Image: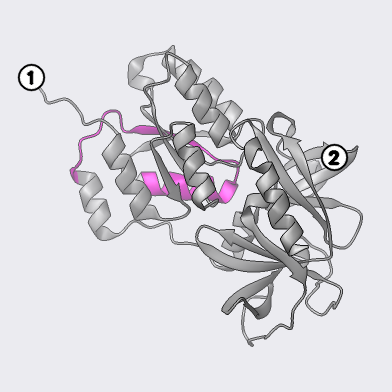
Amino acid sequence: MGGTLLEKVEQHTRLAGHNRVAMLLFRLGDAQLFGINVFKVREVMRRPPLERVPGTHALLAGSCDYRGQTIPVIDLAAALGYPPLRDEASAHLMVTEFSRSVQGFLVADLQRMVQCDGDRLEAPAATLGFGARVNAVTRVDGALLAVVDVEQVLAGIDAAPAELSVQMQRLAGAHTLAPRRVMVADDSLIARRRLVELFRQMNIECVVAQDGREALDRLHELAAADPAEGVKLVVSDIEMPRLDGYALTRAIREAPELRRLKVVLHSSLSGIFNEAMVKEVKADRFIAKFQPDLLAQAVLDLLPAEPPAD
């Protein structure tokens, strides 16, 4: 399955940047389909022997050797409220890479890869009962597909720090920025909270959007309003329902009233392919999640300075 997966990922790379995404489908214990972006998946395999350390987080099934590297293994079924898979010999291991870290997730049953249109992905209704660990839903051959917010799962186990270093806080305080306002677009609640807190430490106000379509609509509204209420910089996730970060950046560059905006793509996706797409859609920077000081420095570099007083 691993070799086949890598071959298929290559076939799907042309979808990125056109508001389409390739999803790897899996199940966690019943008929409900779940999905994850294939660009985050390195390999899939049968569950290997796991080494357990007493006193670790309840969702950590243990660790294993992956190509000479010891990686943590998270019981994704338990994280989503299903019976644990740590002792199930039939379970599969999905090896993933997020924000420069590698980890494995236990799933019950791997399915196939499908292509999803971004504009058909939508935020799940609270009544569906998925909670914060699912950030989008759509239909595949009539069946409901739930896209797992892996950032939320990982943050519940080992949250990345949202604090700026003392040195960066001082540097931000010394900068005169105009306006001190940015657009933040991210479908992950945990990511939005971290970004708002980071910019609060920089004394920068955030206009927040939950997906690329909402961000684009809001940017057009701001462009037509009082310039003092506008933004000069957008910090956007790449994976989002309705309009992804690549497509959002393309739309910004194609709109005369928006094309001068600075765009920072801020994502847990990584790799050479992603870097190439960032250049293709003409984003100004790419910052891997979650590196507060690097993101803050990019904002200071890209936001215009306040004009000197007469």
Determine whether, in the image, residue 170 is placed left or right of residue 76.
Answer: left
On the image, the x and y values in percent for residue 66 come to 63, 75
Hey, which quadrant is residue 86 in on the image?
Answer: bottom right
**Image position of 96 with respect to 208: above or below:** below
Determine whether, in the image, residue 262 is placed left or right of residue 92.
Answer: left
On the image, the x and y values in percent for residue 21 come to 68, 40
- Give, as a single range, the part of the protein colored magenta: 174-199
On the image, the x and y values in percent for residue 197 come to 42, 48
Magenta stretch: residue 237 in it?
Answer: no
Determine whether, in the image, residue 14 is placed left or right of residue 173.
Answer: right
| Amino acid at dot 1 | Asp
**Image position of 169 with respect to 107: above or below:** above
Evaluate whether residue 77 shows in this view.
yes
Q: Secondary structure at mark 2?
A: strand
* Foreground of the two, 181 or 269: 269
- Which residue in the protein does label 1 denote? 310
- Do labels 2 and 1 touch, CB within 8 Å? no
Alpha carbons under labels 2 and 1: distance apart: 61 Å
**Residue shown at 64% from the left, 37% from the top:** 14
**Residue shown at 51% from the left, 57% from the top:** 99
| Amino acid at dot 2 | Val
- Which residue in the protein does label 2 denote? 140
Q: Earlier in the sequence, mark 2 or mark 1?
A: 2
Give the quadrant of the N terminus.
bottom right
On the image, the x and y values in percent for residue 160 come to 48, 62
Hey, which quadrant is residue 46 in on the image?
Answer: bottom right
* Foreground of the two, 244 or 220: 244
